[in-house]
Image (tube, helix red, strand yellow):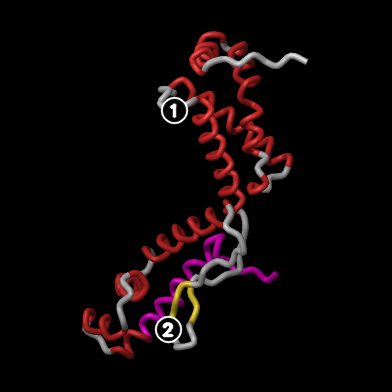
Amino acid sequence: MSKNPSYSDKEILQAVCENGPGGWNLFYAQFNPLIQCIIRWPKWNFSEHEQQDVSQNTYVQLQKALPAFQQQCSLAWFIKRITIRQCIDEIRRQVRWRTFMTSPVQKTPDGDWCEMEFECPDLNPHHEVIQNERRQALHHALQQLKETCKNAITLFYVKNLSYREISEQLGISTNTVGSRLAKCLNKLHKELRHRPLFERTNS
């Protein structure tokens, strides 16, 4: 059984640019096994239909990107990066269509508030995308609040200031700091409930 001949990156790029469909047939024969291998990585957990969608999207992006490829890396590495990016985009699309029952903050036994991490037993692409989407949603929701709430939440959660330090900086009592944070967090919760990653369901 004869093996398909192997061509250099330069030969394949030239064939794609000059020979049209014939060049893409050559490209497909040499690199489709790599593309399909990446798409079928178990960590993606894609269905057969999703694998087909990602494969199609990968080839669409390759058709756009190959003419501008400057050969600063190997063609195989270039194709691998594009394929992985398309896999991550598919996971991001899935995540945006899901609803997660989780709260962005929770009370500690001491009565303070802290961010509640999204529970996921294993580090995987879905978890990474979810965390990134939640951070972006939380940041955008915070920007919708009034300046007094943004300042209070930022000082406590981002700058990690104590109630006393916040009271000195804002010129209010420590009791007012606590009540203001509670009210502002409730407003933040309401703002986040309109977003898919934080929306509560009846299930």
Identify residue type, mark 1: Cys
**Residue at x 62% of width, y 57% of height:** 98
Which corner quadrant holds the C terminus? Answer: bottom right
Which quadrant of the view contains residue 88?
Answer: top right
Which quadrant of the view contains residue 58?
Answer: top right
Direction from residue 169 to residue 146 in the image, left or right? right
Label 2 vs label 1: CA separation?
A: 51 Å
Direction from residue 143 to residue 173 in the image, left or right? left
> Which residue, as the protein is rendered here, is positioned at the far front?
1
Dot 2 crowding, Cα within 10 Å, few <14, some 14–19, many 20+: few
Q: Secondary structure at mark 2?
A: loop
171 w.r.t. 99: above or below: below
Q: Secondary structure at mark 1?
A: loop
Closest to the observer, 59 or 170: 59
Magenta span contains residue 128: no
> Which residue, as the protein is rendered here, is positioned at the far top?
19
| Magenta extent | 179-203
Label at residue 154: none
- Residue 108 at x, y = what percent? 48, 83
- Residue 72 at x, y = what percent? 40, 26
Label at residue 112: 2
101 w.r.t. 4: above or below: below
Identify residue type, mark 2: Asp
- Residue 105 at x, y = what percent? 48, 74
Magenta span contains residue 200: yes
**Residue at x 62% of width, y 11% of height:** 22
> Which of the two labelled residues, at mark 2 and mark 1, occupies the earlier sequence position?
1
Tell me how many marks there are.
Answer: 2
Which corner quadrant holds the N terminus? Answer: top right
**Residue at x 49% of width, y 66% of height:** 192
Label at residue 73: 1
